[in-house]
Image (tube, rainbow, N blue to C red):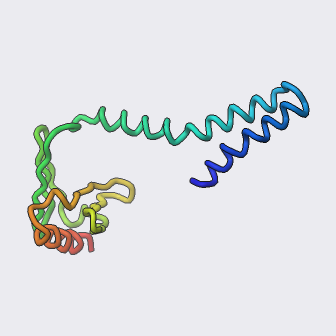
Amino acid sequence: MWLRSAIGIGVFPLAIWLIFSEGWTPWPMLLMLVGTLVMLRPIIWNMMQVRSLHKLPGYGQEVCYTITPEALHIDGESKSARLDSHQIVECVPTTQGILIYHSKTSYTWLPHSAFDSTTDYHQAGTWLSQMAQ
């Protein structure tokens, strides 16, 4: 992350130096364009992620997660699902919530605030960790 920022910022003085030393050749213009794109890339990427999130069919719906020692039940307004223990690849409890991986790159996030009490949160984390083994 810091390298991208350093490159994006460092390209501008180089482009300005080239403008003063060689004049308005294509290289300074190209460097300024690349520097601008490098600096704007995180902003554009974030906008694309937010836009794709809003297009999901279940966006804005209330979802209820029921965790038992055998499975994770997911009930929403439009769909329901059940994740058995063999479908959970990994469970990572943190202080802010629980990450439940159903594949190596796909996960469900359960925030700590979604649980009624800290005891329920710790019990759910224990059950989900046991299911993932």
Tell me the residue at 38%/59% (across/down): 104
133 or 28: nearer the viewer: 28
Tell me the residue at 81%/27% (across/down): 26
Query: How far across and down, in percent of the image, does residue 53 sit?
Result: 32, 38
Quadrant position of residue 8: top right
Tell me the residue at 20%/66% (across/down): 85
Query: How far across and down, in percent of the image, does residue 133 sit?
Result: 27, 74
Quadrant position of residue 93: bottom left
Q: Is residue 38 toward the left or the right of residue 52 in the image?
A: right
Q: Is residue 67 toward the left or the right of residue 103 in the image?
A: left
32 or 48: nearer the viewer: 32
Query: How far across and down, in percent of the image, does residue 79 sit?
Result: 14, 42
Give the answer, above or below, for where 67 lies relative to 7.
below
Q: How many marks?
A: 0
5 or 46: nearer the viewer: 5
Query: How far across and down, in percent of the image, does residue 87 sit?
Result: 25, 61
Q: Is residue 53 toward the left or the right of residue 10 in the image?
A: left
- Hey, which residue is sitting farthest top in the picture? 24
Q: Is residue 16 toward the left or the right of residue 45 in the image?
A: right
Tell me the residue at 15%/60% (across/down): 72
